[in-house]
Amino acid sequence: MDNKDNYIVSARKYRPKTFASVVGQEALTTTLRNAVKSRKLAHAYLFCGPRGVGKTTCARIFAKAINCEHPTDDGEACNECNSCKAFNEGRSMNIFELDAASNNSVENIKSLMEQTQIPPQTGRYKVFIIDEVHMLSTAAFNAFLKTLEEPPQYVIFILATTEKNKILPTILSRCQIFDFERMTVPKIINHLEMVAKREGITYEEEALNVIAEKADGGMRDALSIFDQVTSFCQGHITYQKVLQDLNVLDADNYFKIVDLALTNKVSDIMVLLDSIIARGFDGSNIINGLAVHVRNVMMAKNPETLPLLEVSDQQRQRYEQQAKTAPLPFLYKTLRILNECDVNYRQSSNKRLLVELTLIRVAQITQPEDADDAGAGRSPMRLKSLFKHQNVIQPNKPAMQVAGAGARLARSSESVHAQHAQNDRQEENSPANIPSTAPAPSQPAMQATASQNAPSATPHTGRVRFAIKDIGPTFASLRKQKQEHSYADAIQVDEKEVEKEKVEKPEEKFSDGDLMQQWILMCNRMPQRYVGLAARLKNLVPHITDYPNFEVVVDNQLILDQIMGIRKNIRATMRLKLRNTKIEFMPRLAQQDETKRALTRTELFHALCEQNKDIDRLRKELGLELV
């Protein structure tokens, strides 16, 4: 029969048969060897670790070495005794394997426990290997506990699992626990090179590196991918064919994106991104791959962290070269931006736009700030050119035009203040809150100022420069003056309005409802820096005592002191809004008998039921409960 008809996958064909052939678990295999040599064997072992790292393989090798009649000096099985030959031929009666994923019931465990009562006919131990033990049900675990704690002296249990966190603590406390490590990329590459040489397959080191990274720490996965790539490449594994077969994004794309971002070439990055997406790659994979790449570049900047790169030697050199050109702050900010994109990717309705904006932000990290935008309305408002820098030189303006602009600015600020004096809203950060203390300069005065400050050309550019202080008050200076005013000063405007109302109109009647409405409106108009006090005032209820006088009762001396600080301003506001100049306002501290304990929801419900029996009857008929 042709050998091609007996094809065996590499994961089975090259499965280790001795401790020495196990890859990447030297510490664990040394411990198991020493246990075999010294005959100091525990009754239960637990092998934990990710998939494809050798848990079941080591369990079989260990079970074989335990029953070996003549183990070697280094703890390996001899492969010559009857026990070893029976194991190699698959007819050993002392080693049992159970797949807990499909045999996880109490009946399966009880059947297993019955077998433990029968001593071995040949050999020393009966070894029970239970794979995927975390799949056992809770009842099966409990049925297993007693036997696991005190098994017969000839019984040894070897449990294997990929999820140790799902195993009961009572099981863990009865086992010796061995944590298997993930396979590193260099170790996987070395093992694949050995397999390729034995199979007579030529390869490129970069191609094996891609396979090792794709395996994600699992040797079995690496061998499976190796078989797949071998079939595609027909005996010669190349880097490009591996990328094509596995649909992996070439690392060159990440190197290009970083290089283009360092030179702020946003347009080139957008073209490159479009070509990557056109090849069927998902935006999330691009972002995650770029994040891993930037992390590797950051690790390559320091010789101490360079060994953390699980890449080939050729790739490590490329990372070192790019690390020399990439500043460390750029790498930090890039990782933060990419992480934000990864967090928001699933929730985004336009995922491609999110990826494009992310790459634009990355490309602008090292780009210097452009000049302030004159139409932004506030300073600073920094804008960056998106695709390329454009230095547009504005034509020089005559001094008269600049002076005229200053005069118009001053007149505009004066008119805005006049409108604000009539407005009842006291907004702190609004441009309308500008006092009219600074007089607007006249046009001749502005022209004289402009003529005194001779518009001289700079020796480098020949452009005319003017200091903003020379052309009159600006919105920034007027806003700064306004911010220095306290809330009490702002309310003084209401006092003048009150005097005007007193002369022009008679007193008007108002009720508690009108008072409460204006009270809330007053709280809403308070400036931002009084937001805490405004929130407290909203919780207070003003009451008319001796009409038209009113009061509020507070239960805190600190709040009372704060209200007393602006009491006159509150009174002036209420006089103006309620159109009654005889209003007096006085807050006071609550007496001891006026303070009541706040009732819980249950107490409020019971009190409501006592007042209205129909509510309680409705609750009983509908079977409702207050939770």
Image (cartoon, helix red, strand yellow):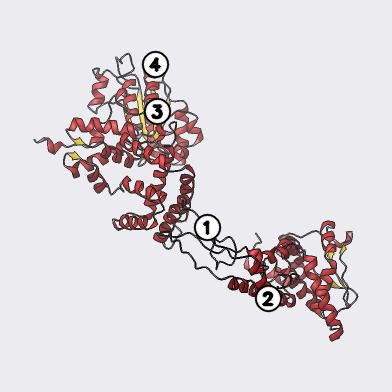
Residue 365: x, y in percent?
47, 51
Locate residue 111 relative to residue 597 in the image: left or right: left
Circle on res. 565: none
Task: Tell me if residue 74 comes above or below residue 594 in the rendering.
Answer: above
Residue 192: x, y in percent?
26, 33
Asked if the residue at tag 3 contacts the one at tag 1, i.e. Cβ–Cβ closer than 8 Å, the answer is: no
Asked if the residue at tag 4 contacts the one at tag 3, i.e. Cβ–Cβ closer than 8 Å, the answer is: no
Which circle, 1 or 4, is nearer the viewer?
Answer: 1
Viewer-nearest residue: 589 or 485: 485
Which circle, 2 or 1, is nearer the viewer?
Answer: 1
Q: Does dot 3 land on a helix, a strand or a loop?
A: strand
Which residue carries the number 4 mark? 39
Which of the 4 quarters of the picture holds residue 605? Answer: bottom right
Which residue carries the number 3 mark? 157
Comes first in the chain, label 2 or label 3: 3
CA neighbours of label 3 inside 10 A, class few (<14), some (14 to 19), many (20+): many
Look at the image and tell me in which quarter the N terminus lies.
Answer: top left
Asked if the residue at tag 2 contacts the one at tag 4, i.e. Cβ–Cβ closer than 8 Å, the answer is: no
Comes first in the chain, label 3 or label 4: 4
Which residue carries the number 1 mark? 459
Which residue carries the number 2 mark? 444
Which circle, 2 or 3, is nearer the viewer?
Answer: 2
Amino acid carrying label 4: it is Arg
Count of marks, rendered view: 4
Comes first in the chain, label 4 or label 2: 4
Q: How far apart are the alpha carbons under marks 3 and 4?
A: 16 Å
Locate residue 117 relative to residue 84 in the image: left or right: right
Q: How far apart are the alpha carbons under marks 2 and 3?
A: 103 Å
Viewer-nearest residue: 380 or 577: 380
Residue 610: x, y in percent?
77, 67
Asked if the residue at tag 4 contacts the one at tag 1, i.e. Cβ–Cβ closer than 8 Å, the answer is: no
